[in-house]
């Protein structure tokens, strides 16, 4: 899978898992919106090629280095890599965590994948978004 970055920060989105919590973020590379939303905060991650090819085990190791708390999956658009995302969220070292997935809402979420996260944040795109 192509991962743009893994980092620790405070979660600024309101969600079931709690706003303001120290969170490990996994930013998937690639976005299907072209042009991107005018509010895009990570234009460098728009291309699928902007990420580093990463195995599930490599990503789990990176995430574990930040501790075992809340996990937020974001992008780009993580659902462009549905199969890899499903495998990652099914990993025993990941699946027990409180997990939020942030999506732009343009790609169908299969029921099997939907159940893997406690919270889904859909960033709806009104006409003022430029999309």
Image: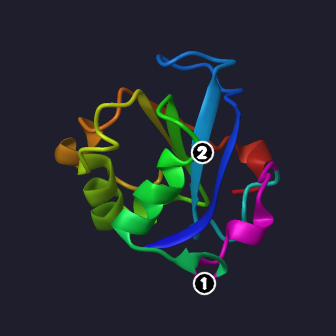
Q: Is residue 104 visible?
A: no
**Dot 1, how many residues are within 10 Å of its Cα: few (below 14), some (14-19), or many (20+)?**
few
Numbered label attached to residue 124: none
Circle count: 2
For the C terminus, the quadrant is bottom right
Between 111 and 28, the residue placed more toward the observer is 28
Q: Position of residue 124 (x, y in %)?
A: 59, 39
SS label for mark 2: strand
Question: Is residue 20 on the magenta stretch?
Answer: no
Q: Is residue 4 visible?
A: yes
**Dot 2, how many residues are within 10 Å of its Cα: few (below 14), some (14-19), or many (20+)?**
many
Q: Is residue 70 left or right of residue 92?
A: right
Quadrant assignment, res 33: bottom right
In space, the residues marked 2 and 1 are separated at their CA atoms by: 19 Å
Q: Position of residue 96 (x, y in %)?
A: 29, 31
Between 42 and 72, the residue placed more toward the observer is 72
Q: Position of residue 8 (x, y in %)?
A: 68, 41
> Outermost residue toward the left?
112
Q: Is residue 112 above or below residue 75?
A: above
User: Which residue has dot 1 on it?
Assistant: 49
Q: Do the CB atoms of the residues marked 2 and 1 lie less than 8 Å apart?
A: no
Q: What range is drawn magenta here?
A: 39-49
Question: Is residue 42 on the magenta stretch?
Answer: yes
SS label for mark 1: helix
Q: Is residue 101 left or right of residue 39?
A: left
User: Which residue corresponds to the image point at 48% horizontal and 46% vertical from the top-left?
Assistant: 64
Q: Is residue 98 above or below residue 91?
A: above
User: Which residue corresponds to the image point at 38% horizontal and 31% vertical from the top-left?
Assistant: 97
Of the image marks 2 and 1, the number of the one nearer the N terminus: 2
Q: Position of residue 48 (x, y in %)?
A: 57, 78
User: Which residue corresponds to the image point at 31% horizontal and 48% vertical from the top-left?
Assistant: 89
User: Which residue has dot 2 on it?
Assistant: 25
């Amino acid at each position: 899978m192509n991962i743009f970055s893994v980092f620790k920060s405070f979660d600024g989105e309101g969600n079931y898992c709690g706003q303001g919590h120290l969170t490990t973020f996994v930013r998937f590379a690639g976005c299907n919106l072209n042009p991107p939303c005018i509010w895009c905060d990570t234009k460098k991650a728009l291309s699928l090629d902007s990420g580093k090819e990463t195995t599930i085990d490599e990503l789990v190791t990176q995430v574990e280095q930040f501790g075992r708390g809340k996990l937020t999956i974001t992008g780009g658009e993580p659902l462009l890599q549905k199969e890899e995302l499903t495998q990652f969220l099914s990993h025993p070292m990941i699946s027990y965590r409180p997990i939020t997935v942030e999506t732009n809402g343009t790609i169908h979420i299969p029921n099997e994948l939907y159940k893997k996260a406690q919270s889904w944040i859909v960033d709806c795109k009104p006409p003022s978004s430029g999309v």
